[in-house]
Image (cartoon, rainbow, N blue to C red):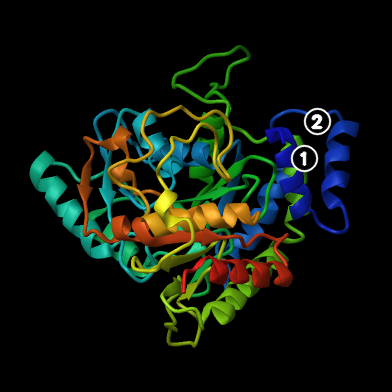
Amino acid sequence: MSEEVKTIYLCLAHMSEEGYEQKYVKEAFDTNWVVPMGPNVYTFEQNLADFSNANLDGSKLDRKVVCLSAGTAAVHLALIACGVQLGDEVCVQSFTFCASSHPITYLGAKPVFIDSEKETWNMDPELLEKAIIDRKEKTGKYPKAIIPVALYGMPYDCERIMVIADKYGIPVIEDAAEGMGSRYNGQVLGTFGRFGVLSFNGNKMITTSGGGALICRSDEDANNIMWHATQARDAYPYYQHTEIGYNYRMSNVCAGIGRGQMTVLDAHIAHHKHVQELYEELLADVPRIHLHKQPSEENENGVKKYDSNFWLCAATLDEDVKIQGQKNVYKEVIKTAVGGVSGVVKSVDSAVTDCQPNDNVEALRVFMAGKKVECRPVWKPMHKQPVYANAVAYTNGISEEIFKVGFCLPAGPYVTDDDVHYIVDCIKEAIVK
C-alpha cells in the first residue's frame, strides 16, 4: 500500500460523520483559496483557540493560535521566538520523538536532554533544576528554553516545571503534539508555557493529513510567529527581508479538513479514554504486563491533576516473561520500514544496537504483527540516539529502562471494543505458559 493511500485511510478513519471536511475543502477549491492562509485557516485557528482557552472550571484563557505546516515547524518557530541562537542550550525531554529536539539543532543550538520521572514517564522536574544549575555553573549561562513533552498524551508535571522555569526566568515550550486535549488541573496542555505545540499528523487526535499549530500567549508573539512562517517579509511594496523566514504556514485546504475535525475532537478524546479503560480491564488478570496509567491525584476542587487523552495506550512487559518466537528475534537485518514507519529508511548492517527493546518485547511485536496488530516499541530516548552521541544529558536510567520493556497498543478512532478484545487475546496467546 502506498503512503498516499495510507494517509487517505487514516484521514477517513478520523472523518466526521457529517462530512464537514469535504464541505470546507470544497469551499477552498470553489473560492480558489488553494494556497497557504485563507478563510479556513483563520476559522480553524479560532476553533483551536476556543478549545484551548476553555478551562473545566468555567474560566477562560486568552491564548492565540497560529496554524503551521507541521508540529516540527511549530517547535522551530517557538525556539526562534524565544531567542535561541547558535551555541545556546535548550533543556528538552529525552524520552520523546525526534521532532522535539531536532529543531534545536536546526538553529545551531545544543539540546540538553532531561530524563523522566517514573510515574508519568515525562520530564523529571528535579533533574531539570539540577541541569539548569549545572549548565549555569559550567557555561556561565542558563539554558534559553525548556521543552517538556506530553508522551503518548500523558501530561507532564506542569506545576513543578513552571515553578522551576519561572524561578530561573526560562521560557517553556510545551510539546503537546501527542497531548491535544489532555489537561492538567482542568487546563488544556499547551497553555501553561509561553508556547504550546500541537500536531495534526495523520495519526494524531485530529488530523489535517499533515500540519500543526502553535499556541501563543500574546498577539505580539502570534504576529511574530506568523511573520516568520511567511518568509519574514518586511512592510514594503517589494520583497525585503531583515530576518530569515520560512514557508511554514498551513494551507487553506488542510485547514478545511481541520475545521471538520474539530467537530469530532471531543468524541475522539472520549474514545481513546474508553479504549484505555477497556485495556485496563482486560489486562488486569494478565500477570507481569503493566498498562501505563495516569496518576490518580486530584486538586483541592476535586479535578483530576492529570487528565490524559491516551493518544496511545502504553504498557511494559516484565523481562522474565517468555514470548513465542523469542529465540529468533534480532537475528536478521531489517530491510524495509517496519509498522508505522513511513517514507525512506536508511539501510543498516547490524540487527542490533547498544540500546534496544528486550528480546521478549521484540518477540511480542513480531508475534502481534503476524496477527495483523501493530504493537510498537516506545520511543527510544534521544540521549541514546547516535546522532546525539555528544549531547549533554542528565539521566536517572528511567527512560532507558522503559524503552527496554515498553510497547504501545492501538488506540485510534478506528479501534473497536472487539478489536481490543482481539488484541488482548493475542497478547495472552503470545505468552509462553
Q: Position of residue 382 (x, y in %)?
A: 33, 44
How packed mark 1 is, by other alpha carbons closer than 10 Å (few <14, some 14-19, many 20 or more), is: some
Q: Position of residue 409 (x, y in %)?
A: 56, 61
Judged from the image, the secondary structure of the residue bearing numbered disc 1 is helix
Q: Which mark is residue 33?
A: 2
Numbered marks: total: 2
Q: Residue at x 72, y 36 (%)?
A: 1
Residue 14: quadrant of the picture: bottom right
Judging depth in this view, the residue of 260 and 42 nearest the camera is: 260
Q: Position of residue 205 (x, y in %)?
A: 63, 56
Left or right of 419? Residue 303 is left
Left or right of 226? Residue 301 is left
Q: Residue at x 36, y 71 (%)?
A: 119
How packed mark 2 is, by other alpha carbons closer than 10 Å (few <14, some 14-19, many 20 or more), is: some
Left or right of 369? Residue 46 is right
Task: Tell me whether circle 1 and circle 2 mark residues in contact (CB < 8 Å).
Answer: yes
Q: Which mark is residue 39?
A: 1
Judging depth in this view, the residue of 140 and 115 nearest the camera is: 115
Relative vertical location of residue 298 with respect to residue 407 in this rendering, above or below: below
Judged from the image, the secondary structure of the residue bearing numbered disc 2 is loop
Q: Residue at x 39, y 68 (%)?
A: 321
Q: Amino acid at mark 1?
A: Pro
Q: Position of residue 341 (x, y in %)?
A: 55, 40
Q: Residue at x 85, y 52 (%)?
A: 20
Q: Amino acid at mark 2?
A: Trp
Outermost residue on the right side: it is 30
